[in-house]
Image (tube, coloured by chain):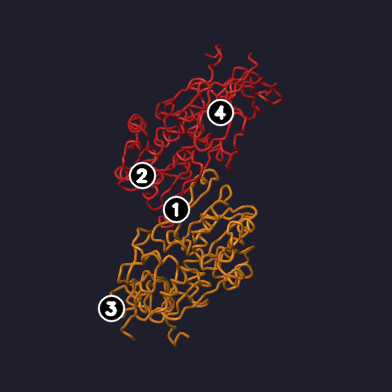
Chain colours: A orange, B red
Amino acid sequence: MTTIRRSVILHSRPQGAATLDDFAVVEHGIPALAEGEVLTRTLWLSIDPYMRGRMDDVPSYAPSVKLGEPMIGETVGEVIASRHAPFVAGQIVLGARGWQSHIVSPGAALTALPDGVPYSTYLGVLGMPGATAYAGLRDIGKPQPGETLVVAAASGAVGSVVVQLAKRAGARVVGIAGGVEKGRYVREVLGADACIDHRAVADLPAALREACPQGIDVYFESVGGAVQRAVYPMLNDFGRMVMCGMVAEYDDAEPAPGPNLRATFRKRLRIQGFIVHDRSEAIREWRAFAAPLLASDELRYREQVVEGLENAPAALLALIGGSNEAKVVVRVADPSPSRT
Amino acid sequence: MTTIRRSVILHSRPQGAATLDDFAVVEHGIPALAEGEVLTRTLWLSIDPYMRGRMDDVPSYAPSVKLGEPMIGETVGEVIASRHAPFVAGQIVLGARGWQSHIVSPGAALTALPDGVPYSTYLGVLGMPGATAYAGLRDIGKPQPGETLVVAAASGAVGSVVVQLAKRAGARVVGIAGGVEKGRYVREVLGADACIDHRAVADLPAALREACPQGIDVYFESVGGAVQRAVYPMLNDFGRMVMCGMVAEYDDAEPAPGPNLRATFRKRLRIQGFIVHDRSEAIREWRAFAAPLLASDELRYREQVVEGLENAPAALLALIGGSNEAKVVVRVADPSPSRT
């Protein structure tokens, strides 16, 4: 068993746009396990937009990553040593957090994963991003038959689930995604009624008006910026904005002005942010609901696999820049031969 | 019986700030009643901030007042002729709408008022403004014991009820009101824990920080502008903004930029607008709840009486400018001698 672990740490806080220089790869020994702890070898690391926010020293729902400490992130790992009774070497678990080749976790934070679907799906469609789509629609967006829902980053980890759930709810679904191929995927595979390529259209408001002739009832927000400015005036009476993220603005050193809020009472709008971790029961509910749909191919997903922990920083920067194709996961290592 | 009615009409649409020249007083004959209609003689006219919005030709939850037509407004009137069976001359009714000395209404729109409390209270503390405070707190603000609630225009028709209901809910209540006398009333009569004079303080954010050492959980918004800009960054996690109005911005020709919405997911904020007329059951509920409290003096209110229909325009402009002292009602006429 190796006694070295590799970590990707936060080397410096971004000034404006984050760069590769803000990260560093370091190697350390692996500490001995205390009672109740479990050591995992990371197989898959999830790359998600919220990680950019943790690089800044700004008050938020979760503490910032400290300079010199490993970046935060969800992983799937294989247990290689355990001082927490339920876990034994060789098990595959969810819940160890960090951009690290090996992670020491409190055993109570871990969940054993069943075989049956690819482990990486527990970081995407079956994991936090899928549950985010589910909880945001269930508790805030509440799309109704015949309503129009617009979702930003529609081919992404959260957006691709939003598209499919909103279609199941009977809504007209208009995706926004950058690039021809993403648009085709959103329409033809995920089933959206339309998908706007925000990079290709010269006039986003006009494109939205054409795609949403009845206005917009629900906007699932994850990008902010120009898309938010185009959508907001098109919200119908009793419109809902499900505020999940604003990735296009995460590199802004100063927050840009937002929308004037007079429309909120003129149109009785609801603008509400949420974090799926506040609704942990939603994650369990979603997993129970979605796993059979995934197995029967009624719920579609795709992943973009990045090879190697050292490439996680570039993967995050690409995600923030919108050049990813789908949910991004980093393959850190393969399972032990005895498992494959 | 007079056959002339006086009306205050919208003479021109405001360009920026509304002025007295945007109104005109006209006299016309009173049309004959059709079957089902009721003619009332107006006793009290309510003056409310929303009226300013109806002077603009902007899409909203209710149509604009047309040029040359009477301004909209709630009244208490005395029936002087009826072709709607339940109503007879001499009854006092709520529901006739318009800045007019005499109003022809469909009988179905009217509600007979009992004696017992001053009729004008049905335009204020027992009426739409009181019910607005009640519904906004019940459905959106939901103040909890120990939370901090801030309410703008705290001495006004809506705000004065918000203060009292939030105190009953166990919240720390901080009012914002312009002027020493209003602040004294908000603290000593309505029972707020503190009241900030936004005209007197040089540094509104600092004054809010001092008055709200635990941050702000609920903001009941009716003014917008500088107060909104000061409150928004102080909202706590899971904070709620009850969007009722933004009177300080109603004269703006172009909407000012609003707050950046990144805080909505960082702090899981809920920003929601509402109109009490969408929740008509709330008006009935509120009246049933509040009338006994009013009778026993557990619910406090005050009114500023403006004499004469022709002074309604100046009363509205003063209200928009914030120089009113309390809920504003116009005494248009006295009840018939037989009733007094």
Q: Which of A255 and A81 is in front in this view?
A: A255
For badge 1, the amino acid type reads Pro
Let me know if marks 1 and 2 both belong to one chain.
Answer: no
Q: Distance between the residues labelled 4 and 1?
A: 35 Å
Q: Which of A83 and B131 is in front in this view?
A: B131
- Mark 1 falls on what kind of element? loop
Q: Mark 2 points at which residue?
A: B148
Q: Distance between the residues labelled 3 and 2?
A: 45 Å
Q: Name the residue under label 4.
A: B23
- Mark 2 falls on what kind of element? strand
Q: Name the residue under label 3.
A: A31
- Mark 4 falls on what kind of element? strand
For badge 3, the amino acid type reads Pro
Which mark is in front, 1 or 3? 1
Let me know if marks 1 and 3 both belong to one chain.
Answer: yes
How packed mark 2 is, by other alpha carbons closer than 10 Å (few <14, some 14-19, many 20 or more), is many
Does B308 sit left or right of A78 as displayed?
Answer: right
